[in-house]
């Protein structure tokens, strides 16, 4: 499973995630948000502020708990 997912069907290209990203790991291409995994620190600001719930971050610690059956 990817740690970072943008649901292109839900993304409206509003740019709020781009504005709130402290590492500038997001940009708009056309009318969709695009993620740069090299710059991203998985802080979750984009996921928190996305009004369309188009961004999902599954942090490694969270994934480890799911794999262990928690």
Image (cartoon, rainbow, N blue to C red):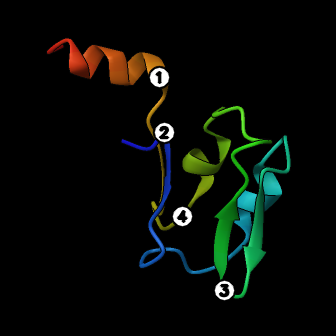
Disc 1 target residue: 60
Quarter assignment of residue 31: bottom right
Residue 69, relative to residue 1: is it above or below? Answer: above
Q: Are marks 1 and 2 in contact (CB under 8 Å)?
A: yes
Callout 1: helix, strand or loop?
Answer: helix
In the image, what residue occupies the spot 48% across and 39% down?
Answer: 3
SS for tag 3?
loop
Q: Earlier in the sequence, mark 1 or mark 2?
A: 2
Give the residue at mark 2: 3
Sequence order check, earlier mark of 4 and 1: 4
Classify 62 as above or below 11. Answer: above
How packed mark 1 is, by other alpha carbons closer than 10 Å (few <14, some 14-19, many 20 or more), is few
Observer-side mark, 3 or 1, equals: 1
What crowding class fits label 4: few (fewer than 14 Cα within 10 Å), some (14-19), or many (20 or more)? some
Q: Name the residue tied to disc 4.
A: 51
Instruction: From the image, state whether disc 3 or disc 4 is nearer to you.
Output: 3
Image quarter in which the N terminus is found: top left
């Amino acid at each position: 499973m990817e740690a970072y997912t943008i649901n292109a069907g839900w993304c409206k290209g509003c740019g709020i995630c781009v504005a709130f990203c402290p590492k500038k790991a997001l940009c708009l291409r056309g009318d969709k948000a695009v993620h740069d995994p090299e710059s991203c620190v998985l802080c979750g600001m984009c996921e928190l502020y996305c009004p369309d719930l188009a961004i999902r971050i599954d942090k490694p610690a969270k994934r480890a708990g799911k794999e262990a059956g928690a």
